[in-house]
Image: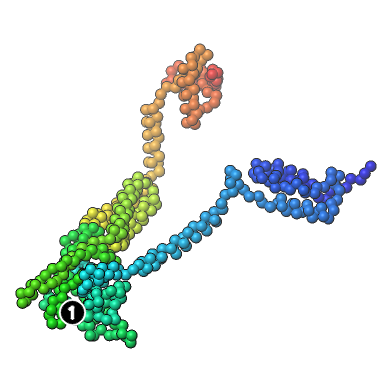
Amino acid sequence: MGLHIPSLFPSPRLRHSFDRLRSFHLIPGLGAAIPDNTTHATVGGTMFTEPARKERSLSLRAIQTPAIRTVNGVIPVPPIFYFGLAILCSVIFVMTIPSVFHGVTAQEPLFKSILDEVAHSNPGIVLLGESVDIDVDEPSVTIRWSIVACGQDYMLPGSSGIHGSTLCGLPNNTLQIYIDGDNDPTGVFDPELIPYSENGERRKIQNMVQFDSDHVLDVHNDRLYPFDTYFLSSTLRATSDKDYPISFSKLATIDLTSSFVVESADVQSFVLSADGVNAPSRDIDIHIRRPIEARLITLLLFASSWFLTHICIGNVILARRTIYVKSILKILIVNGATLIGLPQIRYSMPDAPGLDGVLLDAIGYFPQMIIVGFSVVVLLLTVIARELNDREKNALPQHASMSLAPKFGTYQQSKTKHRPPPLPLPTSNSTEIARYNIYRMGKHLKGEFVFPPVRLEGLPEEAGSPRSPSHKRFKTTTGSPL
């Protein structure tokens, strides 16, 4: 008879079978992860050799590795991946937005195409409005003009390349420029005062080639902000050092400022001089309006202000239906924050005028402040009323408050009391049985049902007669079976 030596290590096949049986409904793929070439112990429990023990330990480590959980056969993406992806998208967005500035600076100079066209079609003196300062509150417009000459016959040698145009430069004649019929020249240009470098290139000193002019602005539509428009017209003429009239070939201004869109158009005109000669001049008409972006932003802010106002009105209605003071205080904080935030929204509108009664304020800001202010007052009064009501309830005597409830309940029960259906008998039809079952289920749902139903026998015929001392003879019997 052989000696049975117990195995020091349990059989891995039995353990794997147990794990597979235990976790079959949790980890379907665990059984597939068990390798087939694992060395197992013999049935008799013989000792493992060293290579078999190492191989078995490696197989156990592979089995103990947590399996990847799947959902409907799909491996779910961990939330940390979406978090990292959101951060990456945010960084890319922030780094991409500043590229707009590079696109603007990469464009060709604004007046280059205008100067090239003048040099080919009508060479002469050109005035460029490089800066247009619009002051609606003044109201006035300040234009900074730059004096330019296009064409070889009008250019000062060594001064080409203004605004990127090689066909235009500084004038080679002395100029005196008059604006809107002034007797004194607004701008004076002397080519002999222009300095030059060693290679003969002329320096462009702004104070020598530019001058400012102030114009009165028509503001009869300023109340229509942000759809306000403005108009400006002006006439300019130039003479040489010997008062010889010189005609302008072109008057142009920039088409976009920080707050306005400028559209200019010039036309040739003439003016009668002192000696009765028609001197050439040039008129310019400037139309000014708000850019589409500014109008859109203003309208969105205007709409958000009204949405907040409507929310405040809804908060008042909600507070009137709330009995808890803490909930009303939360609503009061929201309306108070809105009351403080509405002026900030109004001042954040692009280049918004003051509170001078523009149409936007008449239909927006002022009614909003009035409505939100009254809503805060109503909420404060509601809080005070709720507090006083709670104090009155707390001060009311307890016996007085409890004595009213039974009377009211008895009155209600007396009004709604009705005769219950009779117990069903063996001769009862299905309708009577169903009516009784409905009544019994209603009693059960109200917590008034007692099973089995009990009825008293031997009660006196008259309900008002006093009970006799023989009440111990009364017995209870259950109703007839259903």
Give 465 or 174, whichever is nearer the viewer.
174
**Which residue shows up at 27% across the image and 54% down it?**
368
Determine which quarter of the picture holds residue 114: bottom left
Give 54 or 116, whichever is nearer the viewer.
116
Instruction: In the displayed orientation, state which residue is furthest to the top.
Output: 427
User: Is 146 rendered above or below residue 46?
Assistant: below
Instruction: In the displayed orientation, state which residue is furthest to the left.
Output: 276
**Which residue shows up at 27% across the image and 79% down it?**
206
Residue 425 appears left or right of 224? right
Residue 79 appears left or right of 259? right
Asked whether the viewer can see residue 353, the reply is no
Residue 276 appears left or right of 224? left
Name the amino acid type tagged 1: Leu
Give 354 or 86, whichever is nearer the viewer.
86
Where residue 100 appears, as percent x and y from the top left, is 38, 64
**Which residue shows up at 11% across the image and 70% down it?**
270
Where residue 150 appears, as percent x and y from the top left, is 24, 74
Residue linked to disc 1: 175
